[in-house]
Amino acid sequence: MSLSVRIIPCLDVSGGRVVKGVNFENLRDAGDPVDLARLYYAQGADEVTFLDVSATVDGRDTMYDVVARTADEVFIPLTVGGGVRTADDVARLLASGADKVSVNSAAVARPDLLDDISARFGAQVLVLSLDVKRSDRTASGFIVTSHGGRTETDIDAVDWTREAQERGVGELLVNSIDADGTKEGFDLELISLIAVNAHVPIIASGGAGNAQDFAPAVAAGADAVLAASIFHSGDVRIADVKADLTTHGYEVRAA
């Protein structure tokens, strides 16, 4: 695990606005992405993640603008994903101000995209985002989905993380579809299973409901914890999460 646990607000962006739902469905407006990123930066976020959940051509163009405006005002690492299909897409996002780029559906369809991005930009730029759900169709009990969780594959989640690491990814963003938006806590079984097979940092995502949910995710093997709705609603502040992690003996950067 890295020296300090990172707290990462996630902003799902569609048409230039932040949206949030439950189990990846019933999306509702949650605010302006640049305003929210600025707020989280002021609150002590260690990084910010933007995911373009519509990823249409128009949405992608909007996203470049959102990234550029955010990078002008927020001086912590910025990860951007959604609709990334080529190494040239990565180049344009980096030029717009992103520090890292996450890839999901395109890598599922064409795994050598991971090799291309890692070889061109380095592992430190490349995050594999996995939208994972429970399934009795795989040996691990977890299956990879694509297209925002709407399409099930036949890929075992653990096998995919192993292959992705061999292809040069620098981080694994593990999204639990089953826990997403439920506020019932992170999927600790999923996190620990991925952690056993990982030699790169793991970002746990999906299910945070209060400040006390984060420490168990770290104990399960996460190097960073990502959340959306609890931060957007104002129910939990980043400082609350860092304070609770500190009480459990984890090192965090000052909020």
Image: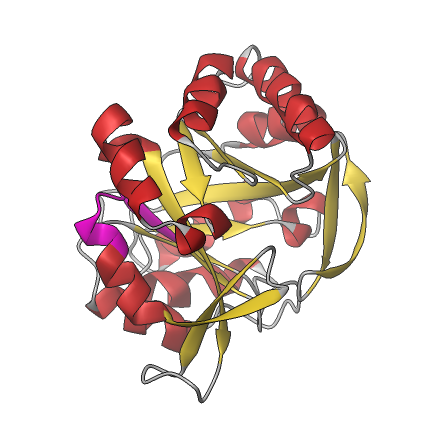
Residue 135 locus on image (x, y percent): 48, 83
**Residue 166 lies in the magenta-colored region:** yes
Give coordinates of residue 185: x percent, y percent: 54, 70
Specify how the rendered protein is coloured: secondary structure
Is 178 placed above or below 118 here? below
**Relative vertical location of residue 117 with respect to residue 105 in this rendering, above or below:** above
Asked if 206 appears above or below 110 in the picture, the reply is below
Looking at the picture, tell me which residue is in the foreground, 200 or 185.
200
Q: Residue at x 29, y 45 (%)?
A: 112
Q: Is residue 39 above or below residue 241?
A: above
What percent of the width, then of the height, locates residue 219? 31, 66
Question: Is residue 181 left or right of 77 when viewed as pictured?
Answer: right
Q: Please tell me whether residue 249 belongs to the stretch shown in magenta.
A: no
Q: Along the line of sight, which residue is nearer the eye, 111 or 237?
A: 111
Residue sitting at x 38%, y 77% = 189
Give the magenta range.
164-173
User: Image check: 104 left or right of 37?
Assistant: left
Q: Report whether 41 appears left or right of 196.
A: right
Residue 171: where, in percent of width, then height? 31, 46
Report the number of numbered marks.
Answer: 0
Closer to the camera, 174 or 62? 62
